[in-house]
Amino acid sequence: MQLSTEHILTTHAGSLPRPDDLAQTMYDVLDGKPVDQAALDARVRAAIVEVVARQQKIGLDVISDGELGKVGFSNYVLQRMTGFEGNADFIAADFAEAPGVAADVFGSEGSRHLRLPVLNGPIELRDTKAVEREIADFKSALGDTSADKAFVPAVTPGHVAFNFPNRYYKSHQEYIEAAAAALAPEYKAIVDAGFNLQLDSPDAAMAFHCKVQGGDLDDPAAHLAAGIEVLNDVLSSVPAEKIRYHVCWGNYRGPHHKDVALRDIVKLVLKSRAKFIYIEAANPRHEHEWAIWKEVTLPDDKALIVGAIDTKTNTVEHPELVAQRLERFANIVGKERVIAGTDCGFATFVGFHPCHPDVAWLKLRALVEGAQLASEHLW
């Protein structure tokens, strides 16, 4: 992914709202009901064409396929890999002091179908053609648009080991390494196809205040360090400029007052060999953290994708506010090293919409308009 010396580029975190009929079929996939796979594949292809065209019309510079063919940004391992079954319970420390919020946050139809599986066997590729279909569908929808102006998200080994409790491997480290080995072909296929690879690693921050019942993660900092080290190893031959590393505190509408501070994890995060470090910077719990870049030096070989849009509210940011958020970073790390993004995805799991799907597209338009304003001010 190339930086611009003329204006601030725009992108987002990957997942976009699925059409209602596609979501209903995905619920059947999650619930283990019979599905006409050929019909599902055809509907996914058509939906990707639509979502690519919509992103292009808005004016986004670096786009995705919306992750429309996946049941979720992380639990798509259910579709592609062996070893995963059942369901585990998600636990977030911030709900302890506001227990009534959880029912509101997880009361949607999407939440009722959400599955966070348990690992009961070795992780091995079950559907070896899945990533090939994903790549082919996206390339077809892009037409003449360069794959370098697009990205494909993939879950990280660390997030797999955080999110899906280990019932098979002898240690947490062994689990992370096994997940890395299983995911490595997916990463390679994405980059070999010319796309930018986004590594989704909410565990980098979430592991400090969240857990999944029965998980074996005891030391969040050690987990983060191990996850990055394993990733760097399996991606050692991939050009750093093809990699985006996304850090997130959880795309759910909780209080988030137990979130770990970016200051406490940033040095570990910067050890990722990814050129593009992608951080939240718009929501009210983390917007203030732009200031840490006055103290923490961004390495010369890295750039920031800045979350300038909050994905957990239905309020559409004013473009001037988006511009202000971007300019704060640009004035510290340099305007050529800032890309405008969203805090997280708009549909991280099927039917899970902290922000209403209609509003998601309004927010993306505000992102583009805000980046244009910031560019006018900075250039």
Image: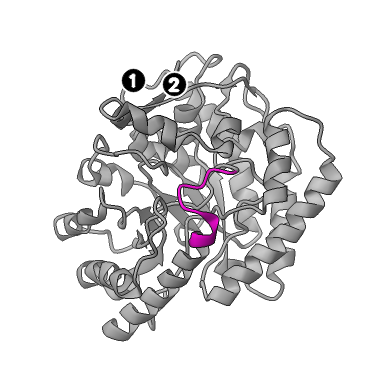
Report the residue marked by disc 1: 218
* Residue sitting nearer the eye, 159 or 319: 319
* Residue sitting nearer the eye, 211 or 357: 357
**Does residue 135 appear left or right of residue 207 in this picture?**
right
Residue type marked 1: Asp
Position in image of residue 332 (x %, y %): 20, 68
The colour scheme used to paint the residues is one colour
Quadrant of the rendered image containing residue 297: bottom left
Above or below for 369 versus 127:
below
- In what element is the residue under mark 2? helix
Query: Which contiguous range is marked in magenta?
Result: 351-359
Residue 126 belongs to the span the image colors magenta: no
- Few, some or many residues within 10 Å of mark 1 (<14, 14–19, 20+): few
Most frequent secondary structure within the magenta stretch = loop
Position in image of residue 271 (x %, y %): 33, 46
At horizontal 51% and vertical 26% (from top left) the residue drawn is 164
Report the residue marked by disc 2: 172
Residue type marked 2: His
- In what element is the residue under mark 1? loop
